[in-house]
Image (cartoon, grey):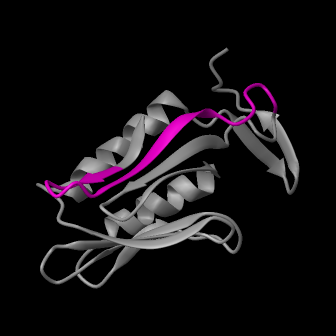
Amino acid sequence: MDLVHLADPEGTRFVVRVVGRFQPGVLTGHDTLRVDVLASTSFVDARLDTFLSPRDLDSWERQLSRMGPGRTAGVDRDRGLSFGIRMHEDGCLSVQLTDPDRLTTLLGTEPQGDWIAEHRGRLEQVRAAWPREVVETAPGAYAWSPDRKR
């Protein structure tokens, strides 16, 4: 399921695809999602893997709600893969993809339609498919949520 899907007629494509839970059934890894990041243009064709935590999804939601010209939304980490989508005054987007060990690139794309509303809907679909089922009861202590579907 695609959390992010940006493509234009020129063939530029940036996709963040959720492929499942990291460690289903294991408290500390159950709510972490495995993700493939795909970037394709005339000069790069890459597939990178990473993980998204529930906090990453919350941050993505907040950033999307504030998105506008001159602003950036994405997943930013001190280590590992990060991406940022910056909206320009003319509505075009710059996507910066950084994986310190493998790749750093900048893509440009012109989104079609109301891409922000579309991506809010994508986030809702991801959360519906892989809901939070673990709660942190104390710092570093986890338990299954009482709402967990077994």
Position in image of residue 7 (x %, y %): 24, 53
Rendered position, 91 above or below 18 = below
The stretch of residues the image draws in magenta is 5-26
Instruction: Please name whichever residue, 124 or 15, is drawn nearer the observer in this view of the structure.
Output: 15
Q: Who is closer to the viewer here, 20 or 13? A: 13
Asked if residue 23 is positioned above or below residue 111 in the image, the reply reads above
76 is higher (above) or lower (below) than 132: below
Q: Is residue 68 left or right of residue 47?
A: left
Q: Position of residue 124 (x, y in %)?
A: 39, 40
Q: Is residue 80 left or right of residue 88?
A: right
| Relative depth, front residue between 75 and 61 | 75
At x 70%, y 27%, the residue is 146
- For the N terminus, the image quarter is top left
Q: How far across and how far down the image is residue 135, in percent?
A: 73, 42
Question: Looking at the picture, how far across and down is residue 64, in whole percent?
Answer: 35, 64
- Magenta stretch holds residue 134: no
At x 38% / y 76%, what residue is drawn? 72
